[in-house]
Image (cartoon, grey):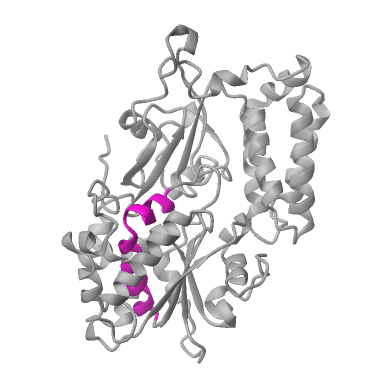
Amino acid sequence: MTTLTPILSRNWDRPDSFTIDGYRATGGYEALRRALTMDPDSIVDLVKQSGLRGRGGAGFPTGMKWGFLPKDNPNPRYLVVNADESEPGTCKDIPLMLANPHVLVEGVAIAAYAIRSQQAFIYVRGEVVHVVRRLRQAVADAYEAGLLGKDVLGSGFDLDVVVHSGAGAYICGEETALLDSLEGYRGQPRLKPPFPAVAGLYASPTVVNNVESIASVPGIVANGAEWFTSMGTEKSAGFGFFSLSGHVTNPGQYEAPLGITLRELLDMAGGIREGHRLKFWTPGGSSTPIFTEEHLDTPLDFESVGAAGSMLGTRALQIFDETTCVVRAVGRWIAFYAHESCGKCTPCREGNFWMVQVLDRLERGEGTEADIDKLLQICDNLLGRSFCALGDGATSPVMSSIKHFRQEYVDHFEKGGCPFDHSRSTLWADRPTTEEGGNR
């Protein structure tokens, strides 16, 4: 069995893990001290050698993204951390920032130094007020300790960091919509090119990275590229959070090398809830094609998951047992995407709206075989035809669920309604009622 690799989560059990004293007591900010003695370009090369790939979903090589910044552009350079985590099932960045905000702050300082930026922004989803407060306190403590601000640790490097609270739009998790929001505009994706590396925030060279990506940088600087590549697979190096939720005995964050399988993770998590069996699951959140029991041994790395027909995404493993109606589950996901579509492009705005209508009709038992084909037709007109990945992501659960569970869609209209008792899929369904001895 692949073992867990508690690195970013190593100190989560410390009561003071979120404080600057608790972080420094376990070696925190030593990587920053080392980085400031290095040439910025050598840090970029180190991150390239490590094979660190973006942990926000796309898996683009982090060091390569840093290297895209044009050297002849006279404008300021900006570092922006995408902390707008809000996709259904995705829940890794928020607990990381809550339990260990200083690893992100240290990563921001190192990354900003490496790309020669003196201004960084952390864009956080506004609803998670407790995380915003904790991050702002961490930044304030870092300023007071001379780890941010003017002449960081006496190196001559200046860096200002702003924690920006977003207004709660899912679309702002898309990097260009995030930049528009950060500039004070309505969050909508931009047409690319130009890409942010050339004309990002305030039309200046900008790097946008996910929280976990930046938080992984201090470890690479402290321990070297070979340490990082010793974990994971050849093309998907390192470790990451695997967020197990749903019908699993012990849901939570499991930090493990890329390439671990769901079967191994379920063994660590106590398996599917007692008395039930796995029906389907998402390898990377609700915007990735669903997997079934036959994919239990698929290595969870970018290449293997892609070859099996899905995407690793944010490693949000939503687990569903046989009590779950796939039509109902997919319908709820698409209702989310329809609600969160910014409306800028017609395929996404109209396609998601109409998929909601069709899925609701099927769930009520009023659909027909033609409605299944209609869903696939809408997906065909949506896939690859929207400004950003929201449209593509919305097609994933629809198309994959019809591929794996088409008969379940048919059963809905042949039987005149949903054949599932929805209460059985709730986590308390198997617990005794009050009459049987009280809720536990």
The residue closer to the viewer here, 83 or 15, is 15
The residue closer to the viewer here, 121 or 240, is 121
Residue 48 visible, this angle: no
Percent position of residue 373, x then y:
78, 34
Residue drawn at (39%, 50%), measured in percent from left and top? 95
**Magenta: predominant secondary structure element?**
helix
Percent position of residue 211, x then y:
42, 60
Q: Quadrant of the N terminus?
A: top left
In the image, residue 281 sits, relative to residue 429, either above or below, namely below
Within the image, what quadrant is residue 25 found in?
bottom left
Residue drawn at (32%, 45%), measured in percent from left and top? 255
Percent position of residue 101, x then y:
34, 60
Does 139 sit left or right of 164 as displayed?
left
Q: Is residue 40 magenta?
A: no
Residue 312 visible, this angle: yes
Residue drawn at (80%, 26%), measured in percent from left and top? 369
Q: Quadrant of the C terminus?
A: top left
In the image, residue 278 sits, relative to residue 330, either above or below, namely above
Q: Magenta span covers which residues?
A: 92-115
Does 91 sit left or right of 137 as displayed?
right
The residue closer to the viewer here, 436 or 35, is 436
Does 409 sit left or right of 225 as displayed?
right
Percent position of residue 302, x then y:
45, 49
